[in-house]
Image (cartoon, helix red, strand yellow):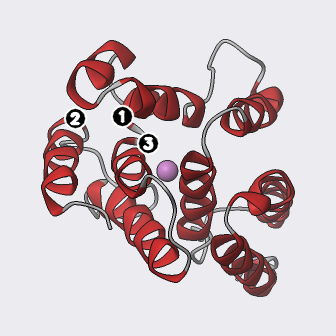
Amino acid sequence: MWSPESYLTALRFAAERHAGQTVPGTELPYLVHVTSVAAEVMRGLALEPMAAPDLAVTCALLHDVVEDTATELAEVAAGFGDPVARGVAALSKDARLAKDEQLDDSLRRIRDCPREVWAVKLADRITNLQPPPIRWTADKRRRYQAEARRIHAALAGGHAALGERLAEMIERYTAYLEPA
Ligand code: NI
């Protein structure tokens, strides 16, 4: 079972670091995204326990602090330990690479991490397969669904329940492929 104390420590850190940011296309605080990813991870853990639940939940809450804020990996390591920092590093795209290489590179690095980190990436994309912003073109929506299929192909073996849920969300997303 994950620990509520670890959850709160990571949540506070994420809340400070993402302060002022919103979920793209909405006015919701960015924390809504990271707590939704954590909720998906916790549902997954309830259905199918993993060896290190706190690693999964903490990485879920912190998965975007390096990619989307000025936070350094060293701060994550100092506050939450090396396994969490390694997970957050793998979950962060490498902005030095060409955009179309970033996802596959991240997926390769995630696959070198414990399965708990795979679970976070599955949960992240499950969460992101909400109805897309109106301004997204049909082409962008199709590419987003195709990317989700790549994530599923690479990582569904890491957690069957989250893999199944991602597959369901990918199918459901087909309804949004034509812009309104
Ligand atoms: Ni995310």
| Amino acid of disc 2 | Arg
Look at the image and tell me in which quarter the C terminus lies: bottom right
Which image quadrant for residue 26? bottom left
How packed mark 1 is, by other alpha carbons closer than 10 Å (few <14, some 14-19, many 20 or more), is: many
> Residue 90 in the image: x percent, y percent?
59, 31
The yes-or-no answer for disc 3 within 8 Å of ligand 1 is yes
> Residue 110 in the image: x percent, y percent?
67, 37
Q: Are marks 1 and 3 in contact (CB under 8 Å)?
A: yes
The numbered mark, 3 or 2, whose residue comes first in the sequence reads 2
Whole-Å distance between the Cαs marked 1 and 3? Answer: 6 Å
Can you tell which mark lies on residue 17? Answer: 2
Question: Is any part of residue 70 visible from this angle?
Answer: no
Task: Give the residue displayed 72% in from the left and 71% down from the top.
Answer: 163
Q: Nearer the viewer, residue 117 or 145?
A: 117
Q: Residue furthest front?
A: 51
Can you tell which mark lies on residue 147? Answer: none
Question: Height in image: 164 above or below 127?
Answer: below
Task: Give the residue displayed 21% in from the left and 26% down from the top.
Answer: 79
Residue at numbered disc 1: 65
How packed mark 2 is, by other alpha carbons closer than 10 Å (few <14, some 14-19, many 20 or more), is: some
Going by the image, does 136 lie left or right of 52? right
Can you tell which mark lies on residue 63? Answer: 3
Going by the image, does 176 lie left or right of 65? right
The numbered mark, 2 or 1, whose residue comes first in the sequence reads 2
| Amino acid of disc 1 | Val
Q: Secondary structure at mark 2?
A: helix
Question: Height in image: 90 above or below 45?
Answer: above
Task: Give the residue displayed 14% in from the left and 54% down from the top.
Answer: 8
